[in-house]
Every structure is written in structure tokens, then in C-alpha cells.
């Protein structure tokens, strides 16, 4: 085992930071988490990360010679080429040279950084159902909705690193709800976990302040018509957005993850119905829409895949 | 001049086939066209093409040693990897091994085939405004609407070679017009040249049977409010579709061509207004939306660029 090469994944979240050592197989050897303190300076936060990386390596009985690389994901905008966190809305951090900071401690070791949703797409490519596709769209449906695009087994970043903004496709032009982005009618405002919970407030026998997408789903599974209806609405809107992505990209599959994807069976028939009414060509109509098989640690696996995916496609 | 290497472009259209010899600069040295006879077998049509290629080469004082390659575009579905025309709706031709047929006469010479809209996108990349962008969306707005996607200066084909179907993004869910594809509310059904002409029928003092997008544009330029309104409607719908493509792809630019793009100034303010209300991030809001500078022979230039673009990106 001492000759084994491994990757360190750093999964930065708004409330917690999860760090782990991930094998080539995707198995997590050791992991450790600590609360993200948004009052920390970026440098202090990165130093905390470094300390925990060391603890994990020690626990696994490994030293830096075993390190194939370090993958870091952030819930915000990243420039993967420069290795810089451009902006993390949750903490207000801007223009943090993450790679440079980490490189001081680990010179010569590949270090990659990416937006967390894009990292999940890569995780799916390397370790999940994406293995079997050359081209696919990854969509995280959680409190918000984000997407990542894989073409020819590579991540599409876009001109300014924001390709894949599936959550901000306008799916309702007539009666659009206000979205956090400032526009109206975005998918995120109509079909995210937050949106599903909001739609159900006052419609279910649940105390409004404690309604979540999960509790709405539980009611739906118990046959509650209003709850089923909210998932039907969300599914139809997701189907609209997926039709746009499919007509533009003609992907081999659409793979969804995130908390709301756990209620995939409530959404799927409605996604499919709307989707098929709005895509051209039989090949698009038959695109598989799949639920991720990666679980709770998809973010950490995704961070590690930033290194393993580059391994796959060769040096760049 | 005799040492100059050139490309032959074959631009197959539903009514005419245009063949020309195109220099590296994009200049057309010689060209010749003949009517496309859809009753011809594919093989007969290709033999006619070969004959005209020979005539053009002779007229240019060149022989096959001067040939850098042959680019062929078709108004239909093509498999660029196999060099096969999968389906051309206008003639009903299916599974025609175009490259194989031409290769018999020109062994060892690179021969590429593509869908005509994709070829236009590549033409824009190599010879047009696309030269300055790494990533852009090409959209042809003509009797129909089609698109081509360039990412990292390469064509995105999609899993089944139909990426870029901008014309079939549903832009009207409530009161969608029936589209030729069988769906309702597609951009093509609401904003193509055909759609603009249809919308204006009975609204202008023009004999309905002779209304075209061009005559509606002429009325609009003369200040006719109904005509201006049709271009406003079309522009708003185009803005919706462009917002989807931009949120998905985050391109560096959107470049439009085709007959209707000649009325760009009638459309542009309305495209821009809707577009900006529906894309996320300042970088997307500021995406340049440009009119192609390539003219009437964009198709032929596009066919030639199938060879010159491969030259750009190296052998594949």
C-alpha cells in the first residue's frame, strides 16, 4: 500500500469543508471535515485545509511522495486555468490564488481547482455513470440548480467559466418567479428544492416554516395530491430546461444529482413528458435521463476527479 | 501560382450545387454552379460534381497536385467522422458514402463532409468574425433556423451529429405555432423568414401570396408599424433562444447569417432586450451579437473551411 498513489480532495462548502484521500478506484481511504468559518481570511482557511490534509495523510500512513495531486472545489466561480477562485458568494472571497498558496507547501504536485458543480460532473465522468458516455450534461438539483457539460470527455468551461447555467434558463416567461440572480422565471426559481418547498407552503398540513423539498416528497409518497402536484410542476419545468440543453448540445445522457434528485421517481415522468414534446429528432427524445449513483460524498469524489480526469485525458 | 495549394468546396443546395476553388485567404478563384436534380441518384449527382470540379481546376490552370483537400457540405444530417451523408430531407438521399465516392477519384486527398450550417460556422471561424473568438455560436436565420457551435475553435457535433438545433428551442409554450419538426412553439416557427412572412399576411398592403421576410423588412424600413411589429416579435423570440444558448454555453459571441440577418438592425434591439433579461452574469449580458461579414457565398466558403479548419487544428 505504501507505493500506492492517491489524490487529496478538498470539498469546500458554505457550512463545512470536507477533506479526504481518494484512491484511483474512487474509494475514500480517510476523510475529515471541519466547519467553514466565513470570517476567516482565505489564507487562514487554506492553512486550515493544509493542516487537515496533513492529518489525513498521516492517518493513512502516507507521505507527500504518494500524492498524485490535489483537487479543490469551491461553491463559486473558479478559473481552472489560473487555479484561482474568482468569487465565492457565500464568503465574499474574491481572486484567491488557491493553487499558488497550496503549491508553496506542495511544490511540483498537480493542483486543480474548479466550481463544485463542474467537479461533480467530472466525478460522474471518472467514477459514475458518466463513464459510459462521451458527452453528457450533469445537473445538480438541490437548494439551487447548477449544471456541468462534458463534451468528448472534457469539461466545457465557457468563455468566462460559467457554461452550464441550467438553473438560470428561463422556463416561465408569463408568470415568472423572481430568482436570486435578479431575473424572473429561471428554472432555479421554479424547480429547485427551495422552490418546491415554497410552492407547497400553505398547501400541505405541514407547518410552513418547517417545509422542505424532502417533507413535500414524503407527503407525495403518501399520496398527497397537492404535494404530487408540486413535483409535477417542478418536473415539467425541468423538462423544459433539459429540452433546451438537449437541442443545443445533443448529449448522450443527462445525469442528475443533488438532494432533490433523491425524489427522481416523482419527477421523472413529468420531466420526460415535457422534454419529449420539445426536442427535435428521435435521438434527442431517447436521451437517457439518469439519477447519479454517487452518494453523499459526490463533492469530495468530484474534487479528486479533477486530478484523475486530467490523468485520463493526458497532460494539458 | 502553379505551386499554390487550394481547396475545392462543394456546396450542395436543394436547388443548386455551387462548386469553387478557394484559396487559403478565402478568395474564390473559380466557381461554377449547376441545378441540383433531386431525381438523380446520389452517385449520379456526385459524378456531376466531379466533372464540374475538373472543369474548375482546368479553368484555374491547376491539377490534382495543387489540391489540399475537398470540403463538401450538405443540407442535411452528416457523419463527419465516416464522411457519410446520413439523410438529406430535400432529396431523400440516405446513407451516401460521399467521401468514399470522391476518394476513388482523388485517392490520398483529405475529403471532409459536414452539415451546411455547421460548415457556415466553420467558415466564420476560419474566414470571418469568428477568427477572433475561441468560442461562439453561429446561427443561420433564413427560411429555417439552424445553428453551429464552436468551442475551443472546434466544431461541436453532438452525440448524434445534431448539436446546435437553435431553431427548435421552444420559445412559446402557451400559444406555440406548429413547426415543421412536429413540435409546437419552436423558434423556427416563430422567427424564421417563413414565419415572419406568415405573420405579416393580411397585416400589410402586400398581396399575401407574394409576401416574403424581405418585403416585410422593406415595409418596416418605410416605417410601417405592423411590419416593424413583426420584426419586434421575431427579435424577442430570437432573444429568448439566444439566452438559452448563452446560459448553456457561455460563448464569446453569437454570430448570425442567412437572409433574415440582412435585416439585423430591425431585429437587434429586440433580441438584445429579451436576451439581457434572461441570461445570468454580466459576461453573458455583454456577449456581442454580430452579423456575419461573409456574403452570398458563405456556403462555398464554409465547404472550403472544412479543410482549412482541420489545417488550423492539426491532423486528427
Image (cartoon, coloured by chain):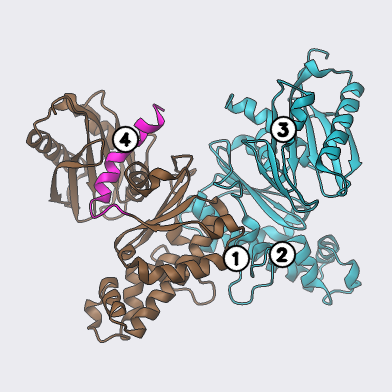
Chain colours: A brown, B cyan
Mark 2 belongs to chain: B
Tell me which label, 2 or 3, sits earlier in the chain.
3
Disc 4 target residue: A308
* Res A266 quadrant in image: bottom left
Q: Is residue B258 above or below residue A84?
A: below
Between A28 and B231, the one nearer to me in the picture: A28
Q: Main secondary structure of the magenta part?
A: helix
Question: Under tag 4, what secondary structure?
Answer: helix
Distance, label 4 to label 3, CA atoms, is 38 Å
Disc 3 target residue: B99
Mark toward the viewer: 2 or 3: 3
Residue B133 sits inside the magenta stretch:
no
* Residue A171 visible in rendering: no
In the image, taking residue A311 as reference, residue B141 lies left or right, namely right
Disc 2 target residue: B180
Please give the name of the residue rendered at 58% of the width and 47% of the height, measured from the top-left corner. B160
Please give the name of the residue rendered at 81% of the width and 18% of the height, measured from the top-left corner. B64
Question: Under tag 3, what secondary structure?
Answer: helix
Distance, label 4 to label 1, CA atoms, is 38 Å
Distance, label 4 to label 2, CA atoms, is 45 Å
Badge 3 and badge 1 in a common chain:
yes
Distance, label 2 to label 1, CA atoms, is 13 Å
Mark 1 belongs to chain: B
Disc 1 target residue: B170
Amino acid at each position: 500500500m505504501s507505493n500506492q498513489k492517491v489524490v487529496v480532495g478538498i470539498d469546500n462548502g458554505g457550512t463545512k469543508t470536507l477533506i479526504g484521500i481518494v484512491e484511483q478506484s474512487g474509494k475514500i481511504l480517510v476523510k475529515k471535515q471541519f466547519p467553514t468559518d466565513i470570517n476567516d481570511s482565505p489564507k487562514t482557511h487554506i492553512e486550515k485545509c493544509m493542516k487537515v490534509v496533513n492529518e489525513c495523510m498521516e492517518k493513512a500512513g502516507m507521505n507527500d511522495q504518494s500524492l498524485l495531486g490535489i483537487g479543490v472545489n469551491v461553491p463559486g466561480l473558479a478559473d481552472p486555468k489560473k487555479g484561482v477562485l474568482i468569487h465565492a458568494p457565500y464568503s465574499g472571497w474574491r481572486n484567491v490564488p488557491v493553487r499558488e498558496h497550496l503549491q508553496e507547501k506542495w511544490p511540483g504536485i498537480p493542483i486543480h481547482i474548479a466550481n463544485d458543480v463542474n467537479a461533480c460532473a467530472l466525478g460522474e465522468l471518472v467514477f459514475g455513470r458518466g463513464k459510459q458516455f462521451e458527452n453528457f450534461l450533469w445537473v445538480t438539483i438541490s437548494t439551487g440548480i447548477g449544471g456541468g457539460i462534458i463534451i468528448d470527455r472534457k469539461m466545457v468551461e465557457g468563455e468566462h467559466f460559467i457554461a452550464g447555467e441550467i438553473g438560470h434558463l428561463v422556463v416561465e416567461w408569463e408568470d415568472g418567479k423572481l430568482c436570486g440572480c435578479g431575473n424572473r422565471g429561471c428554472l432555479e426559481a421554479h424547480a429547485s428544492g427551495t422552490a418546491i418547498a415554497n410552492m407547497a407552503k400553505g398547501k400541505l398540513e405541514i407547518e410552513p416554516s418547517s417545509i422542505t423539498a424532502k417533507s413535500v416528497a414524503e407527503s407525495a409518497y403518501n399520496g398527497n395530491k397537492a404535494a404530487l402536484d408540486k413535483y409535477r410542476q417542478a418536473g415539467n419545468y425541468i423538462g423544459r430546461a433539459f429540452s433546451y440543453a438537449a437541442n443545443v448540445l445533443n448529449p448522450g445522457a443527462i445525469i442528475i444529482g443533488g438532494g432533490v434528485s433523491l425524489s427522481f421517481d416523482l419527477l421523472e415522468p413529468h420531466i420526460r413528458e415535457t422534454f419529449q414534446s420539445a426536442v427535435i429528432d428521435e435521438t434527442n427524445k431517447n436521451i437517457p435521463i439518469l439519477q447519479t449513483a454517487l452518494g453523499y460524498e459526490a463533492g469530495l469524489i468530484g474534487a479528486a476527479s479533477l486530478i484523475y480526469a486530467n490523468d485520463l485525458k493526458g497532460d494539458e
